[in-house]
Image: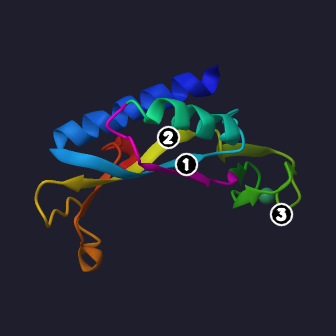
Amino acid sequence: MHEASLVRSLLRQVSDLLIAHDGQAVETIRVEMGPLSGVDRTLVEIAFQQQGDTTPCRGATLTIEEVPLSAVCRDCGDEFEIERFRFQCPACNSSRVQVTGGDEFRLIDVDMRTSQVKTQHSSGEAATADSCGREPADPAPNRQ
Ligand SMILES: [Zn+2]
């Protein structure tokens, strides 16, 4: 099953992060999923229940965020979100649109409990610091 192997590699990524940051337990795993990912949300949740129980992610919550299908118009350059698979530019009605996003299934971030009481790995969210370190999933090259 496609979803089972996706979840397997997801859990591997998460446990690598846990080890790298000396985490004790994973609390929340956040992934994003586009409508063109070909991934069945229900199957992902089932696979997570089956596999999550035998990993350091035991007891963790999986949050799946559905991201919209995004596109850019090749005629006027307008960037927009595609609704109901209507591949037409809302600005100039051109049908020469290029899909730019919506096929992803990837880890966004992980909330984990660490041995230190106050651990904040990221820079931007200092005000909400608690016992969870929030860590970006991957230092993606497209981040900057
Ligand atoms: Zn256009």
Quadrant containing ligand 1 = bottom right
Q: Marks 2 and 1: CB-CB under 8 Å?
A: yes
Q: CA distance from mark 1 to mark 3?
A: 25 Å
Residue, disc 1: 32
Q: Amino acid at mark 1?
A: Glu
Residue at 36% x, 29% y: name it. Answer: 12
Neighbourhood count class around disc 3 (C-alpha, 10 Å): few under 14, some 14–19, many 20 upward: some
Per the image, is 98 magenta?
no
Give how far across and how far down residue 129 sits, in percent: 24, 73
Extreme-bottom residue of the structure: 127
Extreme-left residue of the structure: 116
Residue, disc 2: 106
Give the residues drawn in magenta, as a range. 55-69
Give how far across and how far down residue 105 sits, in percent: 56, 39
Q: Marks 1 and 3: CB-CB under 8 Å?
A: no
| Labelled disc at residue 90 | 3
Sequence-wise first label, 2 or 3: 3
Q: CA distance from mark 2 to mark 1?
A: 6 Å
Q: Nearer the viewer, mark 2 or mark 3?
A: 2
